[in-house]
């Protein structure tokens, strides 16, 4: 079962051995921090609990290795005030020092004032360089003659403008752009191509959202960021879970068993998952496969950049795992 392509750009993907982060190991669930009301700050499926010290070590070395391999010493990222970018800011600062990190805050007209305040709090705590760039005027100028543009179009355009700003600042700052997307959103396609999905490397791309919360709590991300409902700030009051219709712990647990462990639909239903939920998530994963691949090229020579359709992917590639890899009718192209 492998929705993520094993071959990208002619090279085979490498994965952490499961036990490096404590997966598949029988152990007590780590203590989840409690808020002022005495309740746990977040939900964490037992099977997704990990050793946060090991995770920080692995990710820190990954960050340093990516920069070193590309010949850079600095990094730049977009800081939204959410938990994903907040965690990455802390991880990068821990790995290379806050003095080598630039956080760019890019609010739009629909952004919550609380998001900007939380982002500024992270900058203050880390002591890193920062800059505020308003993307609202960019979006408004582009859609000035298209007053009926949907929130989805505007949201996707804003995401791409933010990434354009980051790559411009990567030149002036002299650093690589760091990605801030988690594994959950990457698998279900809750990303914008050439927007938030674009980066030079991504430290948390193999962490489910529940694990992001666990690591954020361990590294010291402010509590108000950890507990607030994740939101893309597409419109006032919008939340990821409210829009999607399921909770992240519920989705993470399903993806863990379906994707990481290759459980069949029948096995998942026997474990208590709703079959309609499983089918819906399967369609989301399959329908967004194109977002996780480099753009394919027509093969004209022996070695083709990007996904090489003519290459031998090994004896187990393309096994029947029950997921339709073709783009589904109606799936979003962005």
Image (cartoon, rainbow, N blue to C red):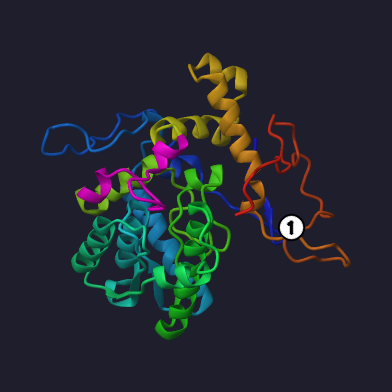
Instruction: Examine the rendering and report whether any part of residue 139 can be seen.
Output: yes
Q: Does the magenta stretch include residue 99?
A: no
Report the magenta residues as a range: 224-244
x, y percent for residue 81: 30, 58
Looking at the image, the residue that sits furthest to the top is 270
Residue 38 or residue 201, whichever sits in front: 38
Task: Mark 1: give few (<14), some (14-19) or many (20+) Cα within 10 Å.
Answer: many
Front-lying residue, 223 or 55: 223
Q: Which residue lies furthest to the left in this view?
A: 36
- Residue 89 in the image: state x and y as whole percent: 33, 63
User: Looking at the picture, how far across and down is residue 172, in whole percent?
Assistant: 42, 85
Q: Which residue is drawn at 55% across and 44% down?
A: 187
Residue 22 visible in this rendered orientation of the protein: no
Say whether residue 242 is magenta.
Answer: yes
Total numbered labels: 1
Q: In this view, does 208 lie to the left or right of 292?
A: left
Q: Which of 169 and 64 is in front in this view?
A: 169
Q: In this view, does 130 lie to the left or right of 6?
A: left
Quadrant position of residue 46: top left
Q: Where, by quadrant of the figure, is residue 40 drawn?
A: top left
Q: Is residue 154 above or below residue 100?
A: above
Q: Is mark 1 on a helix, strand or loop?
A: loop
Image quadrant for the N terminus?
A: top right
Report the residue marked by disc 1: 307
Q: Which residue is drawn at 60% across and 30% down?
A: 262
Q: Which residue is farthest right?
A: 300
Rendered location of residue 166, percent (x, y) = 45, 73
Q: Which residue is drawn at 88% across and 67% down?
A: 301
Quarter that holds the C terminus: bottom right
271 relative position to 220: left or right: right
Q: Residue at image x 88%, y 66%?
A: 300
């Amino acid at each position: 079962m492998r929705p993520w392509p094993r071959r990208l750009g002619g090279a085979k993907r490498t994965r952490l051995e499961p036990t490096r982060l404590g997966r598949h190991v029988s152990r007590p669930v780590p203590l989840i921090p409690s808020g002022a009301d005495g309740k746990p700050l977040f939900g964490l499926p037992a099977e997704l609990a990990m050793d946060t010290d090991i995770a920080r070590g692995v990710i820190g070395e990954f960050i340093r290795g990516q920069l070193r391999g590309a010949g850079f010493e600095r990094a730049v990222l977009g800081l939204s005030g959410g938990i994903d970018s907040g965690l990455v800011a802390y991880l990068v600062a821990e790995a290379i020092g806050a003095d080598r990190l630039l956080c760019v805050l890019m609010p739009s007209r629909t952004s919550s004032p609380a998001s900007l305040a939380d982002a500024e709090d992270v900058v203050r705590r880390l002591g890193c360089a920062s800059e505020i760039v308003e993307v609202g005027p960019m979006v408004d100028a582009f859609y000035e003659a298209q007053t009926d543009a949907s929130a989805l179009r505007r949201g996707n355009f804003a995401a791409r403008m933010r990434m354009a700003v980051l790559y411009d600042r990567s030149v002036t700052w002299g650093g690589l752009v760091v990605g801030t997307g988690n594994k959950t959103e990457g698998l279900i396609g809750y990303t914008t191509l050439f927007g938030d999905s674009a980066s030079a490397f991504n430290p948390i791309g193999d962490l489910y959202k529940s694990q992001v919360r666990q690591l954020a709590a361990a590294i010291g991300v402010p509590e108000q960021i950890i507990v607030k409902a994740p939101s893309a700030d597409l419109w006032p009051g919008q939340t990821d879970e409210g829009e999607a219709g399921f909770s992240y712990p519920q989705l993470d647990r399903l993806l863990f068993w379906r994707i990481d462990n290759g459980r069949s639909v029948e096995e998942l239903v026997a474990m208590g998952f709703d079959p309609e939920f499983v089918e819906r998530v399967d369609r989301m994963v399959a329908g967004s496969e194109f977002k996780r691949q480099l753009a394919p090229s027509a093969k004209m020579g022996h070695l083709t950049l990007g996904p090489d359709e003519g290459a031998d992917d090994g004896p187990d590639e393309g096994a029947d795992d029950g997921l339709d890899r073709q783009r589904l009718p109606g799936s979003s192209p962005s």
